[in-house]
Amino acid sequence: MSGKRIDWLDIAKYICIIFVMVHHLEGGSEALYIFYASFFLKAFFFAAGYVYRHTNDFKGFFIKKVKGLFVPWLIFSTFNILLSQVLSFNEHNDLLTEIGWNLLQIRNHGDGIWFVAALFVAFIPFYFLTQWSDKKDKNKGVAAIIISFFLSAGSIAYTNLMDPSLLPWNGTELPWHLEYIFQAMLFMVLGYYFRKRYEVTFDKYNTRINRICLAIVYLLLIYMPYVFQIEFPILIDVIYQYVREFTGVIFLVSICKVLKTNRYISYVGQNTLIYFALHGKVLSALQTAMEKMVPNVYAAVLGNAFSANVFVIILALVISVVLMIPTWIINKFFPFVLGRKNEKGYRGNVGQ
């Protein structure tokens, strides 16, 4: 698999990046958000773990992640900040303030392309955990999943119990997503051991009837509390969150395993890092244009839940096509931005 792309993984990343853009667009309903919220980011971490091949050379591993994640994050996030100073459709801070927040990487506080930064940091404990678990015997794989789960639960406990007033930015978020890395790592570990130990069994039972049952279970899990306005105690709510997320990722994988890809889906799926970095400015430009050119029509579309959901999905698809142009230019003429020398052997980014 070293030189060949994995079709179902590109399909999954395509679906997730479309929902990332939908999430950032105006107008999507809460019901639509509930559908994709459980998997649209977690699946990227799952994909990152799935394609990871362990090496005992930490220095080589770290240099590779610096080139493939840190450098693209730094270049794209700085580019977006500089561009915002010249062309912006939204309010923003002065240049030095935005650069400062970007370097701090505190979630929800001017953290440009936060996901790539979070993935870069999460790879560090992930490396050492997989190294430890692969050393002895296969039972260590189960232990690695259990350890990563409790570390993830600990980070959620911190978020819920930490007094946000103790930090200068009045939030529980920590610089460089330190409060989030174990939540990310959990799904990376799940993806890693899914490929190594469980994928063959999963494929065996990924039948049509099982996919239908899984879809029903997933829809019940995510919509029952929403429809019936159920509020769980905090501990039950956290457990329920994990169940939703695990089921959501499994549901996505099961569907993508049987879908057919094409050149468009594959191209977007293998360039999600660029899409993460550039989609914000494009969608802001389109939304601003519609607000100015057809304000009444735009407001009417967003005023109806069904039409608004259809609209944001269509607009996200349009943006995905528009971004193919700068994506091609970057891959062709500026591959160093992605930590590559040329397109030969290119396997994509953000999860593959």
Image (cartoon, rainbow, N blue to C red):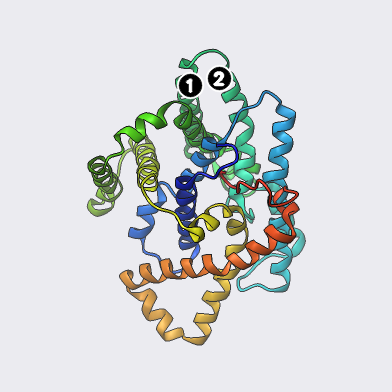
Quarter of the picture containing the C terminus is: top right
Percent coordinates x, y for residue 102 in the rendering? 69, 53
Crowd rating for badge 2 (residues with CA inside 10 Å; few <14, some 14–19, many 20+): some
Q: Is 1 above or below relative to 320? A: above
Residue annotated with mark 1:
141
Q: In the image, what residue occupies the spot 60% across and 42% down? A: 119
Q: What residue type is labelled 2?
A: Asp
Percent coordinates x, y for residue 61 in the rendering? 69, 32
Q: In the image, what residue occupies the spot 51% across and 31% down? A: 192
Q: In the image, what residue occupies the spot 70% across and 60% down? A: 332
Quarter of the picture containing the N terminus is: top right
- Give the mark nearer the N terminus: 1 vs 2: 2
Mark 2 secondary-structure assignment:
helix
Q: Which of 180 and 42 is in front in this view?
A: 42
Q: In the image, what residue occupies the spot 52% across and 53% down? A: 269
Percent coordinates x, y for residue 162 in the rendering? 53, 37
Q: Check residue 134 in the rendering and tell me which mark sits there, or answer none.
A: 2
Give me the C-alpha separation between circle 1 and circle 2.
7 Å
Left or right of 12 in this view: 272: right
Q: Nearer the viewer, residue 235 or 250?
A: 250
Mark 1 secondary-structure assignment:
helix
* Residue 174 visible to an observer of this rendering: no
Left or right of 55 in this view: 191: left
Percent coordinates x, y for residue 237 in the rendering? 35, 39
Q: Which amino acid does label 1 sit on?
A: Gly
**Is mark 1 in CB contact (under 8 Å) with mark 2?**
yes
* Residue 57 visible to an observer of this rendering: yes
